[in-house]
């Protein structure tokens, strides 16, 4: 009998069906997983190939390859600087910062569409930003700062709507600011500083409501500051210094209470500060309005910003007094209000110093070049323990220097030059062991120089000139092992020059002991000054022979020993100092012949041996000042035959005639040089010649105007120096952007290049010559010699840049035929003027496209006269007969057109 089991059969059927369904799902899942995995591999492989292309655009500047892990045999997720998402499917971050990469950014960067962060800062990348970068619509961070990127800003960056940080600081981007950037509504940081941007700030930037930092500093952006920026309620940092902004600051900007940093320095802004300035900016920490044309008084509310760290509004037209309230600024670090018209009066006119004793972090006070009167209070010694720099020069400060100044043990710079200070130099200054620069010149100080100053072993620059100091030069001055320059001139110092005070192997700039009452012999140790460029011991009572050891001064360029009691012969070793260009030994008691190696040195521009007892034969055609030496004669007048009276009479007659002719020649020379405004008196120095024709600017003005000689202001480099774009307020009318040529002091002959350019440009006027505005002959903050030329700035760069396509018109076009023709005409006109239109013909000697600059209207101007040669007399003849390239000047592999016809 058959037995039936329906429940069991039912269970088996259900199990079979379930198993089949599970198997089907498993197969389907496996198929789906396989498809997904294949897609993932495909996407990652695509990113990998894009990265390989990216690498092909880079050049490695290191000894090792920082991208050595980037190879085809490994996953890009394990490569240096590459980060993938959690699933390892796509590349989402690329950080190659600081790897020393050169080359360019490959356009394949646009294929890494999942990138959220791209960081390439601190490399040496060049070329333009590829337009394909606009495809990275997921990007939040783009940082390519501190490279050499050129070209335009891609407008399609505006398509990166997720972008929060855009940092292109310190590149060479030449572009207007795209208005499309205003579509980046999530942008928090926009850093475009230190480039070559121009145009204006788009008013639509007021739509960037998330913006926290806007940095456009050190560019050529112009126009007005748009008032729409005041709509940016989250903005904390507004930095637009070193541009060409003009007009007034919109009043609404002063009401942006969120601001922490407000830097508008080095523009052409004017106007006054509102009275409630400080009340409306309670969060402000950094304030810099330097190098503008702001006027009016300093609002009292300025000192209500109790959190402020930096206050800078130097080089403006502010007047009135320093308002009260400085004691309310405990966090203040810098108070820089120099070069204005700020006044004070009465003995308590400097009481603001006492108020600053509450600022425990204060490191810097600069109130120089104002109209401050008063006595320096004793409380100055209570300033911050970290206080390091004090600029109070160029005022009307009187009274004594307080002894409490010795409490400022961190002080590195003390500048009290050009005041009315009296009394003695306090010996407590010798306690300032960190001091590097001491400036007490042009006051009314008297008494002895304290020997305690010898404790200042870090001192590199000391200037005590133009006072009434007496006594000896302290022997302790021999402790200045880091000294670069010392000026004790125009005092009443007596005694000998201590040999210890000449043991300065580091002295490289100047030793000036002139116009004192120093006596005795010049020590042999003078020859230890191997690096010094200028020595002036004129107008003293120094006697004895000139030591032959002076040949040890291998770097000497100017030696002035006039108006002393030197005797004996001129040492022939003086002629062995190859760099010597000015030698003044006039008004002494020197005798004997003039060494031949001095007479025949064409490099010596000034040789003054007048009013001595020199004798013998002098070379004909020499350019030395020799008057007052009755025993000197030309070769034709030195034959002496005592047996023939007639011949003796003839010789005497010829001598009289020669003297008359020499006097006429000297007078004619004097008149000629006076007409050229370049005559040097016997005691004149070359620096004085320059100063007489140019109102020189200070090193500080140039340093500040070029943002501390930053790379972003670099216009170009040449054999003798570097050219920067700078911003100077030379006077109330002529202020703004200039081209500043800073000479390379390490280059042999740099001073000659400096003088040559000044000499070539100071007497020429032509619309197609770059205008020399002024110059700077000073020292930097490390005590090194500093020479610079300030010329007009030509906004369209050099002809070389246009020829090679580095510059173009706004429409992308280069020079057209008419512009090229006009440039050729301009250059031809100025060459004709230099060769035939000047009183003294000038050969440029280095004319090439990089030295032809283009103004805003595309007119051409010739610049860079560092190799120019003034052709006078026999020099012109020599130039016309040049046949050897050995004597040609100019760039290697290039002969200037000046030489084609002998000019």
Image: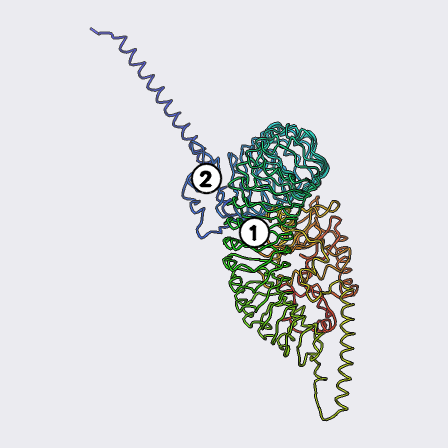
| Residue found 70% across the figure and 87% down from its top | 639
| Residue found 52% across the figure and 51% down from its top | 430
- Residue 39, position in %: x, y? 45, 33
Q: Nearer the viewer, mark 1 or mark 2?
A: 1
| Residue found 71% across the figure and 78% down from its top | 630
In-front residue for pair 243/106:
243
- Residue 248, position in %: x, y? 72, 35
Mark 1, residue position? 437
Tell me how the rendering is colored. Answer: rainbow
In-front residue for pair 644/691:
644
Residue 82, label in figure:
2
* Label 2 packing within 10 angstroms: few (<14), some (14-19), many (20+): some
- Residue 509, position in %: x, y? 58, 59
Residue 772 vs 408, above or below: the answer is below
Can you name the residue that lies furthest to the bottom here? 643
State how far apart marks 1 and 2 are (Cα).
Answer: 50 Å
Can you name the residue that lies furthest to the top here? 1
Query: Of marks 1 and 2, which one's residue comes earlier in the chain?
Result: 2
């Amino acid at each position: 009998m058959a037995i039936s089991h329906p429940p069991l059969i039912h269970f088996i059927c259900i199990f079979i069906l379930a198993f089949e369904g599970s198997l089907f799902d498993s197969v389907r899942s496996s198929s789906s997983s396989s498809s997904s995995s294949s897609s993932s591999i495909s996407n990652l492989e695509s990113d990998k190939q894009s990265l390989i292309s990216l690498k092909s655009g880079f050049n490695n500047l290191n000894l090792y390859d920082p991208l050595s892990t980037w190879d085809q045999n490994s996953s890009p997720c394990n490569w240096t600087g590459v980060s993938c998402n959690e699933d390892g499917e796509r590349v989402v971050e690329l950080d190659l910062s600081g790897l020393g990469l050169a080359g360019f950014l490959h356009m394949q960067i646009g294929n890494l569409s999942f990138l959220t962060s791209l960081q390439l800062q601190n490399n040496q990348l060049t070329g333009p930003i590829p337009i394909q970068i606009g495809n990275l619509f997921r990007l939040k961070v783009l940082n390519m700062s501190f490279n050499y990127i050129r070209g335009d800003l891609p407008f399609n960056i505006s398509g990166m709507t997720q972008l929060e940080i855009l940092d292109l600081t310190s590149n060479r981007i030449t572009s207007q600011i795209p208005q499309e950037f205003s579509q980046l509504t999530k942008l928090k940081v926009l850093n475009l500083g230190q480039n070559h941007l121009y145009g204006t700030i788009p008013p639509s930037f007021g739509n960037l409501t998330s913006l926290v930092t806007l940095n456009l500093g050190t560019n050529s952006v112009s126009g007005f500051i748009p008032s729409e920026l005041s709509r940016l309620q989250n903005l904390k940092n507004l930095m637009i210094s070193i541009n060409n902004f003009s007009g007034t600051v919109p009043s609404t900007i002063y009401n942006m209470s969120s601001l922490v940093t407000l830097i508008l320095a080095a523009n052409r802004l004017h106007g006054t500060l509102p009275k409630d300035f400080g009340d409306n900016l309670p969060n402000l920490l950094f304030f810099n309005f330097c190098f503008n044309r702001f006027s009016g008084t300093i609002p009292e509310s300025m000192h209500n910003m109790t959190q402020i760290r930096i206050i800078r509004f130097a080089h403006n037209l502010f007047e009135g007094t320093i308002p009260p309230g400085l004691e309310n600024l405990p966090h203040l670090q810098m108070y820089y209000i120099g070069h204005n018209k700020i006044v004070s009066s009465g003995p308590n006119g400097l009481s603001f110093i006492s108020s600053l004793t509450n600022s425990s972090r204060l490191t810097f006070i600069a109130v120089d070049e104002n109209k401050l009167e008063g006595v320096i209070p004793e409380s100055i010694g209570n300033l911050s323990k970290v206080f390091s720099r004090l600029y109070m020069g160029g005022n009307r400060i009187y009274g004594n220097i307080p002894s409490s100044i010795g409490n400022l043990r961190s002080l590195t710079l003390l500048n009290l030059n050009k005041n009315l200070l009296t009394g003695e130099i306090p010996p407590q200054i010798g306690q300032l062991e960190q001091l590097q620069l001491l400036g007490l010149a042009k006051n009314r100080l008297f008494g002895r120089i304290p020997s305690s100053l010898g404790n200042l072993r870090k001192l590199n620059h000391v200037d005590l000139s133009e006072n009434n100091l007496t006594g000896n030069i302290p022997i302790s001055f021999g402790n200045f092992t880091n000294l670069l320059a010392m000026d004790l001139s125009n005092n009443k110092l007596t005694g000998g020059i201590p040999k210890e005070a000449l043991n300065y192997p580091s002295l490289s700039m100047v030793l000036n002991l002139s116009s004192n009452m120093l006596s005795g012999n010049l020590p042999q140790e003078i020859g230890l000054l191997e690096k010094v460029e200028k020595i002036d011991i004129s107008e003293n009572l120094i006697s004895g022979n000139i030591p032959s050891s002076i040949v040890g001064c291998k770097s000497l360029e100017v030696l002035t020993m006039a108006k002393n009691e030197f005797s004996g012969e001129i040492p022939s070793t003086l002629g062995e100092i190859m760099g010597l260009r000015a030698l003044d030994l006039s008004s002494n008691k020197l005798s004997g012949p003039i060494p031949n190696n001095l007479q025949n040195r064409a490099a010596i521009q000034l040789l003054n041996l007048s009013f001595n007892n020199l004798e013998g034969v002098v070379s004909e055609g020499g350019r030395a000042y020799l008057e007052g030496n009755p025993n000197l004669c030309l070769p034709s007048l030195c034959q002496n035959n005592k047996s023939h009276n007639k011949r003796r009479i003839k010789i005497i007659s010829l001598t009289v005639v020669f003297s008359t002719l020499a006097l006429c020649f000297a007078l004619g020379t004097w008149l000629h040089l006076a007409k050229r405004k370049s005559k040097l008196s016997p005691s004149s120095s070359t620096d004085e010649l320059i100063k007489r024709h140019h109102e020189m600017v200070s090193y500080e003005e140039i340093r500040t105007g070029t943002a501390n000689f930053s790379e972003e202001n670099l216009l170009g480099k040449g054999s003798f120096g570097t050219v920067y774009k700078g911003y100077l307020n030379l006077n109330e009318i002529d202020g703004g952007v200039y081209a500043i040529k800073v000479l390379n002091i390490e280059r042999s002959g740099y001073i000659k290049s400096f003088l040559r350019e000044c000499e070539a440009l100071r007497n020429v006027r032509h619309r197609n010559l770059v205008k020399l505005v002024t110059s700077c002959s000073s020292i930097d903050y490390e005590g090194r010699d500093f020479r610079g030329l300030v010329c007009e700035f030509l906004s369209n760069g050099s002809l070389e840049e246009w020829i090679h396509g580095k510059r173009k018109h706004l429409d992308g076009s280069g020079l057209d035929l008419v512009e090229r023709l006009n440039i050729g005409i301009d250059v031809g006109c100025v060459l004709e003027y230099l060769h035939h239109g000047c009183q003294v013909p000038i050969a440029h000697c280095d004319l090439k496209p990089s030295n032809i600059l283009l103004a805003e209207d595309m007119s051409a101007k010739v610049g860079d006269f560092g190799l120019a040669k003034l052709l006078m007399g026999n020099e012109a003849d020599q130039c016309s007969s040049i046949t050897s390239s050995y004597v040609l000047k100019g760039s290697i592999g290039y002969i200037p057109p000046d030489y084609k016809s002998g000019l």
